[in-house]
Image (tube, grey):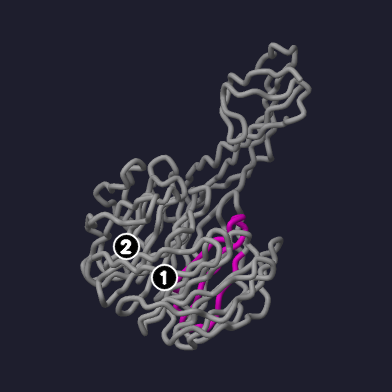
Amino acid sequence: MSTCILTGFAKKKHKVGTSYACNGSDLPITQDLGTSIFQGPSGTILTVPATEITYTIIGSTPCGDTIRRISTKTYSLLTGATYATGNTPIYTAISPDGISVYVTNQAGLSISMYSRNTANGTLSAKTDYATGTSPNKVVISADGKSVYVANQISATVSMYARNIVTGTLSAKTDYATAANSLGLAISADGNSVYATSATGVVSMYARNTTDGTLSAKVDYAAGTTPYGVVVSPNGANVYVVNSAANTVSKYTRDINTGVLSGKTDYATGTGSTNISISVDGKSIYVTNHTANTISMYARSTIDGTLSTKTDYATGLAPYDVTISQDGTSVYAINVSGNTVSMFSRNTVDGTLSTKTDYATSTSAWGIALSSLGDFAYITSLVDNTIMLYLRNSANGVLTKMPTSGYYLFMHEVLTYDLV
């Protein structure tokens, strides 16, 4: 079969210079340009435009085909975005498909589920599900079928089956952890779940990838008061932050069984809490809430070893930390500072710029970014809210949604096909 060469645009599936079938069997090709945002003052009367669809002929190919470009612009209006949670919300997570947001409410003994508009980031009214006592971390499997919550006082991990169409959750199934369960992580392959306990262990559970159920736990020694835990993207290592020991422990992970071995400790700052790893697996970041710093470690993608840390100043009492999917930004939530610190990240060596702080609600705690990097969600454990921020994917800048005025969103998608 003869082919024609793409010359006018780039796309995830087809890059410039690659070929497509002359008969158009692998068209249409779609290019998502993301969301443009226009701000207006309060009191403005605004009519949201209808969806616009325009067609442009962009030329013919050596095969004699004519390619057209279809621009579809969808508009929506947002007039503020602060959403009620349960009592004392702490951590939040977004489903891989982006249609659901979940928040653990520590004093409310619940997890709140919100349906999410993927175009403008807005959330529906919440639906609450019972957890154990003092729910803490929440994670979602990569296939979107299971949600897990670590319950600190109950010493359990609650598993919920998730409806991948609606985001609703089943009644919970509980699995025993060691006492004072704090941190939680799931491997990218979905085969293993890890829970940390303040008693000094990290527990591994084999996960059934069909129904999300867990095996009985296997415990491994950690440092003093382990908190945050993360699995490397390649599944070869698990890292645990030991808050009272001021260390991060590296374990070698068997990618077939999830079994851990060979703990190696690296120094952190004082009062280390949470941990995040870049998508490329080259950098690890740990928040130190007593030292008011974030520690960066270069990570070997061969054996998982870490470099000596490099510290960067944050605001007061940093707890949660996350990295954008494109690797260009790192965010630390400063609980006592009522701010979120944004650092621009060098995607080659993982080093960070000087921080830029953005105001949050009182005692912000957890943060989650949408997979496209256009929105951020931050919980406030005093205000009992989750707040929506707009994120500029070009520079990482956050804009807190106002309580008055409006934002008009224009989401544009280009489709290329044959006439």
Where does the C terminus fall, quadrant-wise?
top right
Q: Position of residue 74 (x, y in %)?
A: 64, 41
The part of the image, by quadrant, that contains residue 166 is: bottom right
Residue receiving disc 1 = 380
Q: Are marks 2 and 1 in contact (CB under 8 Å)?
A: no
Instruction: Tell how many labels.
Output: 2
Residue receiving disc 2 = 286
Q: Report, in whole angstroms, how far the alpha carbon at label 2 lies from the one at label 1.
A: 21 Å
Residue at 39%, 50% in the rendered image: 302
The part of the image, by quadrant, that contains residue 366 is: bottom left
Residue at 62%, 73% in the rendered image: 127
Q: Position of residue 5 (x, y in %)?
A: 64, 18
Q: Start and end of the magenta stretch?
A: 88-114
Q: Mark 2 packing: few (<14 Cα in 10 Å), some, or many (20+)?
A: many
Residue at 49%, 79% in the rendered image: 218
Task: Please say if 351 is above or below 309.
Answer: above
The part of the image, by quadrant, that contains residue 331 is: bottom left
Task: Please say if 62 is above or below 214.
Answer: above
